[in-house]
Image: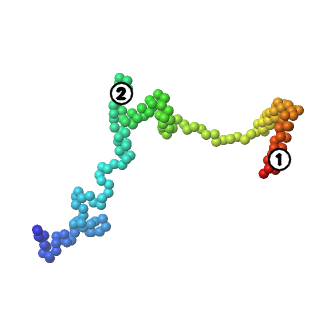
Amino acid sequence: MVKQPKTTNGAQPWDAAPEYEIGYGRPPAHTRFKPGHPGCGGRPKKQRNGRTVLKDTLDERITIREGKRTRSVTKHDAIILRLVNDAASGDAKALSNLITLMRLYGLIEQPQETTSTQSFTADDLAIITDFLGRLENQEESTQPAGSTENSDTEEAKSQGKKSKETKS
């Protein structure tokens, strides 16, 4: 074991008066973290979150062939090209996804909802009552006035109801 050198008054060298004032955020030199020490922990360097990984992956370049020609595009562009081509060839699911994507980016507008309902005017009400009156007249003219079949069936129905009520 190596002996530590002592000062003239018997104190150790690290017990000597510091060159600066010790206080909040200024620890003594012998208690500081050494260089390369991880400290209090925290996130390790160069650790990336999911969004960063996905963005970097989609920004990678790949080569695709279009007919006889090859070209270099990002994976993101290749996915969109494939989606558009599938939708154009008749794939219903791809078409639905493409329309949703187009609405998300504002390329097409959302379907308009009818929010304003106008009340009927006096002229509208007069037309409706006239139509209903003509419809009632037309129904009465199609039924024979002296039909006994209709009255007989109504009497039979009412008698059947009375007999069912008395049986209960």
Up the image or down, 121 lies above or below 39; here it is above
**Left or right relative to 36: residue 6:** left
Is the image coloured rainbow, by chain, by secondary structure, or in one colour?
rainbow
The quadrant of the image that shows the N terminus is bottom left
Q: Around disc 1, counting alpha carbons within 10 Å, would you say few (fewer than 14), some (14 to 19), or many (20 or more)?
A: few
- What's the residue type where badge 1 is placed? Lys
SS at mark 2 in the image: strand
Residue 97 appears in the picture as rendered: yes
Image disc number at residue 30? none
Quarter residue 15 falls in = bottom left
Q: Residue at x 39, y 33 (%)?
A: 78
Q: Can see residue 107?
A: no
Are the residues at dot 1 and dot 2 in contact (C-beta closer than 8 Å)? no
Question: Going 27% across and 66% down the picture, which residue do you hit?
Answer: 27
State the residue at coordinates (24%, 58%).
37
In front of the other: label 1 or label 2?
1
Pick out the residue farthest to the front.
167
Which of these two is toward me, 24 or 96? 96
List the residue tagged with mark 1.
Answer: 162
| Relative depth, front residue between 15 and 136 | 136
Image spot of residue 56 (x, y percent): 35, 42
Residue pictured at 14% horizontal, 76% vertical: 10
Question: Which disc number belongs to residue 65?
Answer: 2
